Amino acid sequence: MTTKLSDVKAAQVHWFDKGNKAFFNDIDYRVLHGKVSGKPYLVRSTYAWSGMLGAPRRITWRINPLNANLLILPLIDNGFKALDDVKGWLKFQ
């Protein structure tokens, strides 16, 4: 079964509200799946914690695993510079 972003939003309404999105400086959300396991991941582009102390803002791609109930789990340690980097990581998941 392929998990859709609308499914995750229905299961985690608070995560996607405007206040949460603004607090974390998130730009976009999508659900992508590991190629090996088929496991779903919430993939988001964000400005989170960039632009502080006069540094330029930069987009980072972050990944949160999703469990069977579509709960959003803690971030993986890696941050990615581009969506293609995320897709490359997902090839081995």
Image: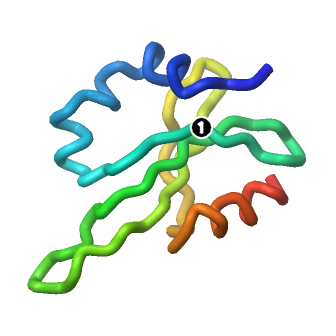
| 24 up-or-down from 37: above or below | below
Point out the residue furthest to the top here: 10
User: Is 85 in front, or is 15?
Assistant: 85
| 87 up-or-down from 8: above or below | below
Residue at horizontal 63 percent and vertical 29 percent from the top: 67
Residue 29: x and y in percent read 45, 41
Residue 45: quarter of image = bottom left
Residue 77: x and y in percent read 54, 65
Look at the image and name its color scheme. rainbow
Residue 85: quarter of image = bottom right
Residue at horizontal 25 percent and vertical 67 percent from the top: 49
Residue 11 shown left or right of residue 14 in the figure: right
Q: Residues within 10 Å of mark 1 (few under 14, many from 20)?
A: many
Residue labelled with disc 1: 31
Q: Label 1 is placed on what type of residue?
A: Val
Point out the residue furthest to the left here: 53
Residue at horizontal 46 percent and vertical 50 percent from the top: 44
Residue 11: x and y in percent read 47, 16
Q: How many marks?
A: 1
Residue 57: quarter of image = bottom left
| 30 up-or-down from 60: above or below | above
Point out the residue furthest to the right here: 36
